[in-house]
Image (tube, rainbow, N blue to C red):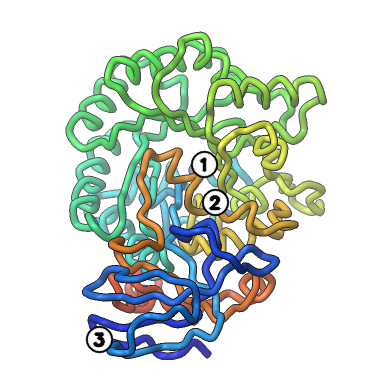
Amino acid sequence: MIPAIPAERRFALLNARVLAAHLPFAPVEFDRDGFALVDLMIDEGRFAAVSPAGAGPSADATLADLAGRIALPTFVDAHTHLDKAHIWGRAPNPTGEFMAALHAVAADRVANWSAADVARRMEFCLRTAYAHGASAIRTHIDSMGPQTLISWPVLQEARERWKGRIELQASPLFLIEMALDPRHMADVEAMLDAHGTGVLGAVTLMVPELKEGLAVLFDLAERKGYDLDFHVDESADPEARSLRVIAEMALKRRFPGKILVGHCCSLSLQTDDEFRRAIDASARAGLSVVSLPMCNLFLQDRRSGRTPRWRGVTALHELKDAGVNVMIASDNVRDPFYAYGDLDMLEVWREGVRVLHLDYPFARWADAVREAPAKAMGLKLDGVRVGAPADLIVTDAFDFTQLFARPQADRIVLRDGRRLAAPPDYAELDDRTRS
Ligand SMILES: [Zn+2]
């Protein structure tokens, strides 16, 4: 059991097992997973000392001995849908398939997504993610028809409310062909001007309007200094090759901003030649790639009555080996695109390890839930160093296999040196209390 964390403003955590990469000094001793044991002094919500275990903080503080338990820094979740989450109760996906999800969400959006409805579900998500240990999140915001003007003010209010606890970014989400509709783009631009976070995006598939639509978004992003964020090739069709189209357009235009691309499922199913060309172009264009292992496993290769044959995830190892900035993220939560999930990046990491083989060695992939998404989002991270906020996720595990064997539901999340409350109760969601 994790020992009690002192409630005082000044206390010490002894023998915390922290990844060497997260420490401000190169430890002399570390274990085979890449962890080192450290003593941490925490004073008024900040790290006052970070030292090798035993070199020890002064004895004038209350002590808690973690006895070698793993303590992680906070998580960064680069791809979520806080506006869609938790609608499953009133909008289930009848077959679990992608097109059924699209239709179920569209019907629910038109019928139910008032500002109050979006705000209530978004707030539940943020409280959940915070309790699990997230400190930064990017969400996509369905931006089509009247919804565009409803959701973006809600996003900005949430962003203000959570400032200092969760850094919240947002990217608009619509089909790339909609970029050719000037009225639609006027709404999107107005909302990004008023409430945006400097990120523009869309869903790309191999529609005839792909290049023309992309050009509109690149033009706008260059004019405004935006970054770009695309849902790319979320499909088992090997002919879905918009990843390379995006990469080549970025190269040709010398696009100066950051580009994050999500899913890229079909990359795994392409011919060797196309596979290599797409990865090479992605690397040269400086793209970041986010894989969504839980949602891909749920939606891809699903046909009623037939056992799935592939995992649905992109070629994350090959992308990383080619020098692409790669990461994993939550994606959908309890909505028609994914029936489960809880905005818990430790769950995403655990499932990522299993679905994508992010092990051997585990530490090689630890940046996929923090540093890599932070880079894609343009965030500066504090880490475990003197003067930084005392933010830590303390677990009951002593090595990576223990960390991923259990859900770590008893983890203690410290923010500014204080223990956070548990995630909110499902009873707070209308779709539960009404049933
Ligand atoms: Zn998504």
Q: Give the image location of residue 399, x and y in percent.
A: 65, 73
Q: Is residue 289 among the parts visible in the rendering? A: yes
* Structural crowding at the residue carrying mark 1, measured as other residues with C-alpha within 10 Å and reported as few (<14), some (14–19) or many (≥20): few
Disc 1 on helix, strand or loop?
helix
Picture quadrant of residue 301 = top right
* Structural crowding at the residue carrying mark 2, measured as other residues with C-alpha within 10 Å and reported as few (<14), some (14–19) or many (≥20): some
Q: Give the image location of residue 67, x and y in percent.
A: 54, 86
Disc 2 on helix, strand or loop?
helix
Identify which residue is drawn at 81% across, 51% down.
306
Whole-number angstrom distance, CA of label 3 to CA of label 1: 50 Å
Amino acid marked by disc 1: Leu
Picture quadrant of residue 432 = bottom left
Judged by depth in the image, the label closer to the viewer, 1 or 2, is: 2
Disc 3 on helix, strand or loop?
loop
CB of mark 3 near ligand 1 (< 8 Å)? no
Identify which residue is drawn at 31% across, 75% down.
42
Amino acid marked by disc 2: Asp
Which residue was labeled with disc 2? 367
Q: Earlier in the sequence, mark 1 or mark 2?
A: 1
> Which quadrant is the C terminus positioned in?
bottom left
* Structural crowding at the residue carrying mark 3, measured as other residues with C-alpha within 10 Å and reported as few (<14), some (14–19) or many (≥20): some
Q: Give the image location of residue 353, x and y in percent.
A: 67, 58
User: In the drawing, does residue 20 fall left or right of residue 13?
Assistant: right
Q: Do the residues labelled 1 and 2 touch (CB within 8 Å)?
A: no
Whole-number angstrom distance, CA of label 3 to CA of label 2: 31 Å
Which residue was labeled with disc 3? 8
Whole-number angstrom distance, CA of label 1 to CA of label 2: 32 Å
- The label on residue 102 is 1
